[in-house]
Image (cartoon, grey):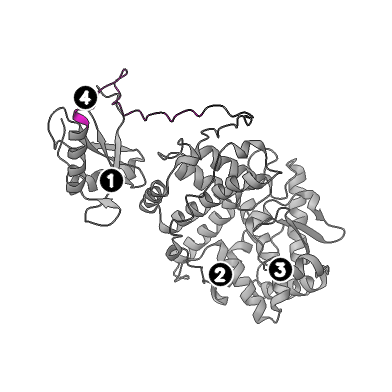
Amino acid sequence: MHQRLNASRIKKSTQLAHSTGRELWLSDDHGAYGMGRLVLRISPGGARRFYYRPLRAAGQSKAVPLGLYSRIKQIGYLTLSQARKQASNLGVSLENSPIVDGGEIATPTPTPPAIAPPADNPRPATTEPSNLSLIQMCRSYARHLKDTGKSSAREVEQLLERFVAPSELANQPARQITPIAFTNFLREVISESSGRTAGKVRSYLHAAYARAQSAQLNPSAPKSQLDYGIESNPISGIDSLAQYQTARTRYLRDGEFKEIWRRIQSKTKPTIAKRGLRLCILLGGQRAEQVVSIKVAHVDLEAGTILLFDGKGRRVTPRQHLLPLLPHAMEEVRWLVNYAKSAHSSYLLPGSRQDTALNAESISKEVLRIRRELEAEGLCAEHFEFSDFRRTIETKLASLGVSKDHRAQLQSHGLSGVQNKHYDRHDYMREKRDALALWEKYLSTLTEDLPSIAS
């Protein structure tokens, strides 16, 4: 038996969808018999969208999307009364629509354009762009990032699979989706997750379209990229959601960092994730994505160096980032090399499956675990995350007298200018070694009363 929709029912059903992790469809009993129903789809993440579902085709006709639900009037959303009015108008307009075989509501067939007579010298027939879908284009873009060693590849793939793949746009031809459709889609992402996440999804979609569009004028692009037929980027005109993308400024004070570092150092048998976190810090605040990608072959214990590959930004080829190993880092790396060999892994930080690398997310989860410990003990007044370590370390190095240029060389950032790209061939190993020596000395003062932990 159908029930009439109301704000209370919608709220309770939203909570139920979230707690069970299952999608719910609510039907409204408002309307005349035989003219269809107003329904509301509630996703587990909390996104709520109205649809009009015709009844005349015995359940075989497609539901027509109307818009997102809001309890109060606001631009881009529908209140319950507004949705009922739209559904009623749509029901009346479809009442006299003819039904074709299979139960689908027929739509007018456009008159085909007149065929021009053949020219004296006809041009070769061109291949029409295929209707490759949005999700196919997105997955191609994610594979491209992975193949070129971009550190963002995993996050891009995860967000596109989480939000684009299950959406109504996923299987539509990428070249036909309008900016309005994408705007409505991003509203759902904001409702289901956050504005910051929606901003990232928008950015990745823009990049995927830009790559497909640029293929038209790129002789080296594979033929498969040309098949999308992308002539314009529908994301370009959509607001960038910059208000949600404020840069983090959090850095850890000496007391906070001391508590964190002592926890990282304290256990005699730390997990591989904790060792990965420790190595990121010992190497002067390196990115987790790059540290987990280090292979045993990139370590030279005799020379005392470790090689990372920085694929961040628009680099076609990842930048080689060679670092010296100071005593504490050398001790850590030596243990990891022996462990990786015993596990028959080519990666310095082995993953759970054979010959795979540790997931960088595991390092972030280790930071989360430590943060919760500190919060429970009242030792941390403000949230922190892994990315704040890099900022904290650079801030501390600055206070220890390390110059801005040498900090940039150590952390591999801000090195994309013409001077660095074409003219500066100095390897800065001495400067990086001096900076890491200061850093290890500082870390030692935080745990002077703790035993060695690399065993």
Give whichever of discs 2 and 3 has the lower sequence position. 2
Q: CA distance from mark 2 to mark 1?
A: 40 Å
Q: Is residue 113 magenta?
A: yes
Residue 440 percent location from the top left of the image: 71, 71
Q: Residues within 10 Å of mark 1 (few under 14, many from 20)?
A: many
Residue 256's spot in the image, x, y percent? 54, 72
Q: Helix or strand or loop: what does disc 2 sit on?
A: helix
Q: CA distance from mark 2 to mark 3?
A: 38 Å
Q: In this rendered view, identify the residue nearer to me: 344 or 99.
A: 99
On screen, residue 342 above or below 256? above
Q: Residues within 10 Å of mark 4 (few under 14, many from 20)?
A: some
Q: What residue does disc 2 label?
A: 259
Q: Residue at x 47, y 66 (%)?
A: 383
Q: Is residue 12 above or below residue 28?
A: below
- Tell me where the magenta segment starts and ends, as one range: 94-116
What type is the residue that disc 4 sits on? Answer: Arg
Q: Which residue position is annotated with label 1?
A: 14
Q: Identify residue type, mark 3.
A: Gly
Check disc 2: other Cα within 10 Å, few if <14, some if 14-19, many if 20+: some
Q: Nearer the viewer, mark 2 or mark 4?
A: 4
* Classed neighbour count for the residue bearing mark 3: other residues with Cα under 10 Å, few (<14), some (14–19), many (≥20): few
Give the residue at x 69% y 67%.
411
C-alpha gap between disc 3 and disc 1: 50 Å
> 168 or 330: nearer the eye?
168
